[in-house]
Amino acid sequence: MTAGEPGTRPGGARMLHEWFADGLARNPDGPALRILDRAWTYTEADALARTWAAAIGTAGGTGAPVAVLASKTPEAYLGLLAALYAGAPAVPLNPENPVARNAAVLRAARCGAVIAAPDAAGQVARLLRSAPVHAVLAPRTDRSALPAKLPSAVGGARVLTAADLSGAGGGTARRPPTGTPDDLAYILFTSGSTGAPKGVPVSHRNVSAFLAASRPRYAAGPGDRFSQVHETTFDLAMCDIFPAWAGGACVCVLSRLQALDPARWVRRYGLTVWHSTPSLARGLQRADRLPPGALAGLRQSVFAGEPLLLDTARYWRRAAPDGVLDNIYGPTELTIACTAFRWHPDQDLSDPRYGGTVPIGDPNPGMAAMLLAPDGSPADGTGELVMTGPQMFRGYLDPAQDTGRFLHHGGRRWYRTGDQVRATPHGWVHLGREDAQVKINGYRVEVGEVEAALRDTAGSDAVAFALDAPGGTRLVAYLLGAPEPDTGRLTERLADRLPPYMLPRHLWWLPDAPLNAHGKTDRSGLREDAARRLGHEGEATP
């Protein structure tokens, strides 16, 4: 079954920074970015990004990807724009991730420069020992605050700080080099099944197609204030940043703790658009932290990354009675979100086909989709979702990782999402996955990468999987075989290799691997054992 055959997209393909230019033209003196009590107008954001882009070029940048090593700071957002102004794809890096993982990303993306936030400057020297670049830009850091070993760590690279940028008037005149919509806008790295991060290059054309499809849904204008909960290493952050900037709205940054008190920040920031994962809303529901009307003022709430339960949608709507609620879906490879569904409380979703969840809806304009049966033939009612169209990326940074992810059908190339969906009168319903990929707090995690890290670190076999628990989905793991590991030391070593969201919440050891009738590790038995353990340990388990 196919749906949504592509046609001419409204607005056509454009460069990503041109969408920001729309917001700049609409609201030059209005806020583009706010972090706590500090706001940057569109004019200020534009000037800073151009100055930073000029500095990268002066330091010998060649248009190679620019890493942005920052979390919830001005660099995290204006650094993205600076990379675009420099004519280079941005590569977001989270300073909370292990240095070894960030270095692997720098090498894989072949980054030519790094823009670093002040709190990340200490990581730069360690990071660049194994991944040298041409330039390091720490635009809000004094040179005295840099590690003494930083210059030697980057060899011939130029290291630029706040002092080097002061009085640099040429930045505001900086114009992005001539490019085409098929150039890369950014590269995001997701979990990889082989034990290494998997690079997803996204072009300006891909993002432009998403924005052209989603802008009418958001209808953002200068009076809007968007929440920004996600890290920029998570593609859903782009769903806040660029739809807001395209409309002249303000991106309001929230820390993890602030996001757990949305009523306070909706009031303080005057938020009009909220975007988060369903698990955040579910946690607030369990704690009953949102009285009816607590989120009055929100005109739109958007959820993505995980299935949205109907009772959670109802709970949120009672707290935000003045707005609409959208549930969107899309893997990074299909550029942020490729389907959408607008939920209303009066819709009848009681049929068991919906599984107690809000549908993910229908394809964005311009995207084509079909369902596959287990044997690979087209299916009508239920099957694996495969899609094609202008939001589909061209392929992974490492072409070897394309194997098995694409399908050629009807003279076109389609991306296999691996997600099982069911067709309903209200669009598709997400049924989960049949492979080893899971979602933890909205992040896509390849269990194979977790198992590879465990095996390499512990020197024994390992099994990992996700389990539903009262506190939400948890990643758990078993180490199998003698000798008994020092789990405390092992956990420390894992933290040096995996980002926090990929660390098993529970790690157990068994001296012998249980086997099934075929002589293979009994994963089903281990899953049942883990469920029993979680049931006994309850919510008190750290």
Image: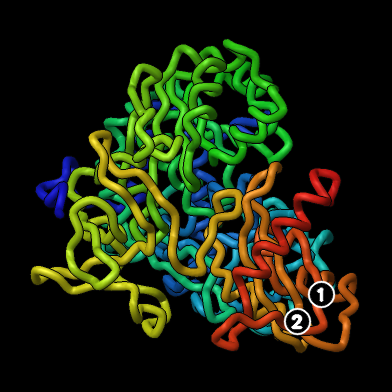
Q: In which quarter of the image is residue 139?
A: bottom right
Q: Which mark is residue 480?
A: 2
* Residue appearing at x 33%, y 24% in the figure: 348
Along the viewing direction, whichever of 59 and 184 lies nearer the viewer: 184
* Residue appearing at x 76%, y 50% in the figure: 535
* Residue appearing at x 35%, y 44% in the figure: 429
**Can the viewer see residue 305 in this picture?**
yes
The residue sitting at the front extreme is 517
Along the viewing direction, whichever of 438 and 297 lies nearer the viewer: 438
Image check: 143 left or right of 436?
Answer: right
Q: Do the residues labelled 1 and 2 touch (CB within 8 Å)?
A: yes
Image check: 2 left or right of 360?
Answer: left
Question: How far across and how far down the image is residue 13, in percent?
Answer: 21, 52
Q: Mark 1 points at which residue?
A: 509
Q: What residue type is labelled 1?
A: Trp
Question: Which element type, helix, strand or loop, lies under badge 2?
Answer: strand
Numbered disc total: 2
Q: In which quarter of the image is residue 94?
A: bottom right
Q: Quadrant of residue 409?
A: bottom left
Q: Quadrant of the N terminus?
A: bottom left
